[in-house]
Image (cartoon, rainbow, N blue to C red):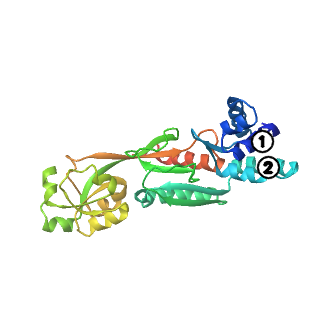
Amino acid sequence: MKTSMDDLYLFILTVRHGGISAAAQAHGLQRSKVSRRLQELEKSVGCQLLIRTTRQIELTEHGRLLYQQINQPLSDVNQAISVLKNQQQSLQGVLRIAVPAAFIASTLFAALLDDYARQFPDITLEIIHRHESVDLKRENIDLQLLPDVLKVINEDYVQQVFFPSKKGLFCSPHYLQSHAMPHSLNDLFEHAILTSHYDSSILPEGLNIRLISEDLELVNLMAQSGHGIALLPMIVVQQQLKQGGLVHVLSDIYQSEIAMTLIYSSRQFLPKKTKTMINLLRDKFLNYS
């Protein structure tokens, strides 16, 4: 799709005036026309240039890059458009993913990154620790993974729940040598509990919470060392269960599930590097249980 120089001019006016309405009013144009032409410009270059709010606009990273270039001679403007389009379709650059520490600690996530890095060696992976929903556009983050119990701050973002896993209560055989085996949920009040922030909020009030950490491997290790009963996803403790390092307690009484939400800002302007990661996540984890 060919980029219109008129649309580029309207983009410049909008940035200079700090908003679509202000630009339209200053130059005697209809606001709806300016807005529509800016949407056409974004379609032609294949990426989002502006973050629209009720009162003002903000430039995305691509928008800033384009604005810096289009005050140059016409030949440089055409080159900037070409660079922007090629960037969207290339498998290089930086892919930024926001992930809670609890998920980063999993061997499955490490395997995913290993697979992606082997397939696309020219892409730099930047893994950012975030425990709450973030504004992906303003923080220039391509993807976010969050536990599905957390609210996403922008309801317009694309959300897909996947990667379900059962959770249970686990402790070491060593711990049970000096503590009674729990036979009911009420028995948990007699034990030290090891958990994450997410799970501590859904446990009964009044429990003796001995450790709270988003690092599930740390919770796992503390449980193996006999410091208490841990609430953990099954995927984290499978190896320890097989080797006898942990025991599943109250398995017939307490059972819950955790799932992750994959979040990205738009289906329309996804760079190829982001699409490939989304496809890899779906292939590996969408039907995982």
Marks 1 and 2, how far apart at CA? 8 Å
Residue at point 66%, 36% (across, down): 21
Can you identify the residue that label 1 sits on? 8
For badge 1, the amino acid type reads: Leu
Q: Is residue 181 left or right of residue 29?
A: left
Which picture quadrant has residue 269?
A: top right
Residue at point 72%, 47% (across, down): 16
Numbered-mark total = 2
As displayed, is residue 163 above or below residue 101?
Answer: above
* Secondary element type, mark 1: helix
- Quadrant of the snapshot with the N terminus: top right
Q: Is residue 210 left or right of residue 65?
A: left
| Front one among 234 and 95 | 95
Q: Work out whether residue 253 can be spotted.
A: yes
Going from the N terminus, do you reach mark 1 or mark 2 first? 1
* Secondary element type, mark 2: loop
Q: Position of residue 172 (x, y in %)?
A: 23, 64
Q: Position of residue 54 (x, y in %)?
A: 57, 38
Density class for disc 1 (Cα within 10 Å; few <14, some 14-19, many ≥20) is: some
Residue at point 58%, 60% (across, down): 125
Can you identify the residue that label 2 sits on? 70
| Front one among 40 and 283 | 40
For badge 2, the amino acid type reads: Ile
Q: Position of residue 162 (x, y in %)?
A: 44, 43
For the residues bearing labels 1 and 2, Cβ distance under 8 angstroms: yes
As displayed, is residue 177 above or below residue 41?
Answer: below
Q: Position of residue 136 (x, y in %)?
A: 54, 49
